[in-house]
Amino acid sequence: MTKSILTKTNIFLIGEEQNMTETDAFPKRFSDLGFEVKCFNDLRAEELLLKIHEASTASHVDADCFLCVFLSHGEGNHIYAYDAKIEIQTLTGLFKGDKCQSLVGKPKIFIIQACRGNQHDVPVLPLDVVDHQTDKLDANLTQVDAASVYTLPAGADFLMCYSVAEGYYSHRETVNGSWYIQDLCEMLGKFGSSLEFTELLTLVNRKVSQRRVDFCKDPDAIGKKQVPCFASMLTKKLHFFPKS
């Protein structure tokens, strides 16, 4: 089993309206795992783009991983800076292999705590599902000319982690902070140095999905649910093992 041992890393937390969980406990979880933490708050769009550009053009030769966290408001495929919204792909695109060569072959993780729409996810009851055997299909083979140099796609080794599925509200408590960051923080504390990271994210998905809105000024939100999601373009398993 292939494992990545991550030692020197970077994390950027950029956002607003954060509470103690998000400003203190959450960064500390990653610091305890060997991350070098840098925090920026209430940035204007121009300032945010500048910080991200500086991070993408910096040398990451000695780093094993790059992690960027946004704690903000959002809508669809955008997040909000202090004064304007920015397309997420504009930010992540700066770290693709053809733009940021010192991170080629290294995990580039983006964690985004923000709403992605105005829909409330509703509770449903699971039904028993009968397993059935599907017919095996012939393998679809792609033949390519042999190459002497191993290359990676420019978009490889990204891991996009969202607090909620596209189109839905991301819930936040006034005292404890966002559901997603609370549960991600807890799982990192318990399993951050032992579980493969996408397995840990799956536990976070389950934990958040078991929550429901009990108290809210918006009566339409009562009883509503949330489930995070992540999209992995990683080419290796991702472990945050301490360096021996």
Image: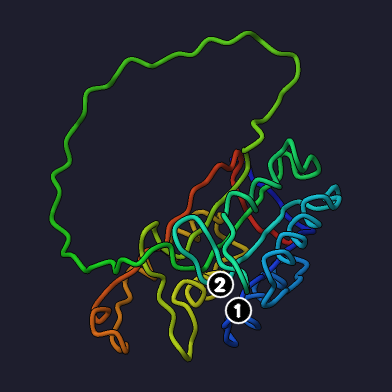
Q: Residues within 10 Å of mark 1 (few under 14, many from 20)?
A: some
Q: Residue 128: give x, y in percent of width and height.
A: 13, 54
Q: Residue 28: give x, y in percent of width and height.
A: 68, 77
**Disc 2 secondary structure class:** loop
Which residue is located at x 75 percent, y 70 percent? 37
Distance from Cα at disc 2 to Cα at disc 1: 6 Å
**Given the image, on which type of amino acid does mark 2 rest?**
Ser
Whether residue 167 sits left or right of residue 9 in the image: it is left
Compared to 199, does 73 lie above or below? below
Q: Residue 194: give x, y in percent of width and height.
A: 59, 61
**Given the image, on which type of amino acid does mark 1 rest?**
Glu
The residue that label 2 is drawn on is 72
The residue that label 1 is drawn on is 16
Q: Are the residues at dot 2 and dot 1 in contact (C-beta closer than 8 Å)?
A: yes
In front: 40, or 10? 40
Which residue is located at x 74 percent, y 35 percent? 98
Compared to 46, does 82 lie above or below? below
Q: Quadrant of residue 137?
A: top left
Q: Is residue 243 visible?
A: no
Q: Quadrant of the C terminus?
A: bottom right
In front: 77, or 178? 77
Q: Quadrant of the N terminus?
A: top right
**Disc 1 secondary structure class:** loop
Q: Is residue 100 visible?
A: yes
Which residue is located at x 68 percent, y 41 percent? 96
